[in-house]
Amino acid sequence: MLQRVSLLGCSAAYLVLFCISGPVVAARPTPNVILFMADDMGLGDTSAYQDFTGNSDADQLTTPQMERLARMGVRFTDAHTPSSRCTPTRYALLTGRDPWRTRLKHFVLYGSQGDPLIEADRPTLGTLFQQNGYRTGMVGKWHVGLRYRQSDGRPAAAWLDADMTQPLLDGPLDHGFDAAWFTSRSHGTSGPDGDPLGAKGGPGHIENRLMVTATGPRTFTTEGPDAYELHKLGSRHSDHAIEFLNAHTANGESAAKPFFLYYPSNSNHGPYTPDESIAGERVAGAGRMKDGSSASTRLDYVYENDVALGRLLDWLANQDDPRWPGHALSENTVVIFTSDNGAERSNATCTGPFRSNKSSCYEGGHRVPFLVSWPAGGVGDGDDSTPGLNSLTLTSHSDLFATFSDLLNEELPNLTAGEKGAEDSYSVLPAWQGESQIRTTPLFVNDHKEARQYGKVGDPAVLAMRIDNPVVDGEEVPGQWKVFFGANLLRRGQANPRELYNLADDPQEQNNLVKDRMWKKLLAYLAEVGTERRSSGGQRISDACNHPSITFTQTDLANAISDKPAFQLKQHGVSLTITAVSDRRNGSTWAATSAGLGISGGESPRVDSGEAIIVTSDQDIVVESIHLFAGEGACGGFYQIGKAVPLSIYCSDADAENEGTKDQTGIMHDFGVLKAGTPLKLAAAPFLGVESPGSWTIRSIRVRPLN
């Protein structure tokens, strides 16, 4: 591959370009960024990958603007989404953290509200850019959760007690965006008529914090510019994107800043509703196959992405850069085009030469288009008349956080110091700049609809892990190894390999090697790596911590309690102090039953509302898991580390979701680092004061000392 001049030693405020053997030739500011992500678009849906997928001209939609971007920059053929579905991919893309580390083990946020998946104090791409002086905007599909308000301004518990005339309590503006025009989730269910009962409908158009389609607490307009019309979303979002960009460059104060535009489009998720036109360019009925024949309605909707992308590329090419006189904005803007998961259609035309499609951990479910250009930064040359570069580097959308941090010379959050952020993100900037880059850490993807082949339950909370050329017992095992772990790994921290493939010679995943004794040692190694990485709280924590885990069992807990509110647990040099707290005047005492450890004197021998358990450690540790059990009680409440934002809990036999987000039960994992003396509070009180309280016991605590 072509070698590029590294820009990593330059400051974040201004980067300098050098001739390979000469003096400085130009100074330029930090780049602008446009991140465009399609919905349910596979590798085969764009002609930019036709030579890779092998689609015939009769089967291949023509996407000239995606081809244009590929020629301008770099095309990745081994790029992956962190999940085979939309909500978790969006979470990981924005945060640099694998999505199964949240309460969502599979599926998507489902229902009208869908409590926010991104906690308020978690860094995102939006906050990263804001902290580096960018103005940030978002248009399109959000789908990582919202929190509405009741009429009195308090948080809404669900859709049915929400007042749509009240401003949003939690949305994009709370996660790093200065401006946002968006739909709450997939467009077919984001409008007022998304569900005839109203429980799964949506508020329609949202601008910043306001539901502009709403005319009352539970009424919505059906006429005028703010009416929610599925066939007009393409032009609406494109217009808002251009509005954001024009306003940015026209205002002297903002024009002095770089911009970040996050554009997750609604297309081409079903129902297929291509707009009539975007900025005068026809969309519906305008899609064409490579042989000149007309495209289907679905492919017209894919083509809508191409038209919207082309409008952005044209705008950049025709605008002078206010921060870099004499240059067009296109020279110093990072433009990315990708998708949130594989195609929703299961055929080779859509997915390319790979097995299955959306909601599958097979390659067709998560290997997606990824095109990137940044001429001034050595990411392609910006010339759409010449062939672009092709990269074989293995990458995930979760890598964007670290890659942009690298570009900005921004240090990633220090996880071992108790900070949070980008736990699973690794920079691929060298690969963007044309260098050969080998991934040395595992790549994960979750949610597997084919899990039914594993048994009667068919739990889709499957985690697949890929490691290329692993070293086992000092010897390299050549290959692109991909192992599938049953749902017990995500739910209980127990690795049970179900499938094993070598993608290097079996890219269609047809030859399952999991029962081949030749690979027994490799499989044991992969299971060990998968277990450790799953439980560590983040891959970057794994990189910094090599101590074995310590488990305090239910028996250990029961044997350690006394008639005092606090007791200690000690193993292998680690000492935990466990304290019961209660709002009752007579204090708190412990109750050990067959269900686990609870607090007596309240409504039950469990931890009830008004009661909490505090865990502290005598040294810095990673809290890998805490097993909460609802039993005859209920799952509800929150946990909080120090002064961090509280987060909703879940139990091994129940979860606190109230909006139909399927089964998210499991042993709680991924607490991250607990600093010595910092309290970890587990409380049964309602998370935001409007939900039902919990009533549960603790069955085990697993920790690991930091190095």
Image (spheres, grey):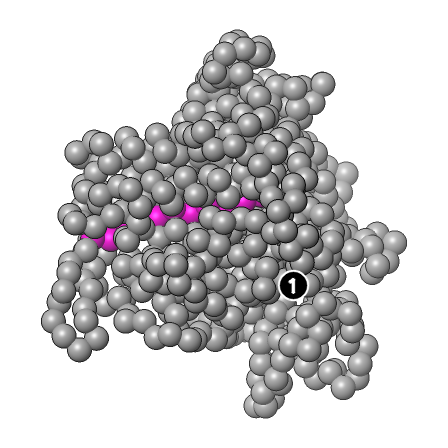
Residue 515 shown left or right of residue 280 in the figure: right
* Residue sitting nearer the eye, 234 or 183: 234
Q: Position of residue 368 (x, y in %)?
A: 58, 56
Q: Is 36 inside the magenta-drawn segment?
A: yes
Q: Position of residue 217 (x, y in %)?
A: 54, 11
Residues shaded magenta:
29-39
Q: Is residue 635 visible?
A: no
156 shown above or below 502: above
> Which residue shows up at 19% across the image and 71% down it?
19
Q: Position of residue 687 (x, y in %)?
A: 54, 34
Residue 440 shown left or right of residue 32 in the figure: right
| Numbered label tally | 1
Residue 141 shown left or right of residue 596 in the figure: left
> Which residue shows up at 56% across the image and 41% down it?
303
> Which residue shows up at 39% across the image and 57% down it?
384
| Quarter of the image that includes the N terminus | bottom left
Please state which amino acid type lies under the numbered disc 1. Answer: Gly
Q: Is 290 inside the magenta-drawn segment?
A: no
Quadrant of the image occupied by residue 694: top right
Q: Is residue 393 visible?
A: yes
> Which residue shows up at 65% across the image and 19% down it?
193
Specify the farthest residue to the front.
292
Look at mark 1 in the image and give the residue it sits on: 54
403 shown above or below 311: below
Assign a secondary structure to mark 1.
loop
Count residues near mark 1 (Cα–Cα under 10 Å), then give few for <14, some for 14-19, many for 20+.
some
* Residue sitting nearer the eye, 600 or 502: 502
* Residue sitting nearer the eye, 628 or 58: 58
| Quarter of the image that includes the C terminus | bottom left
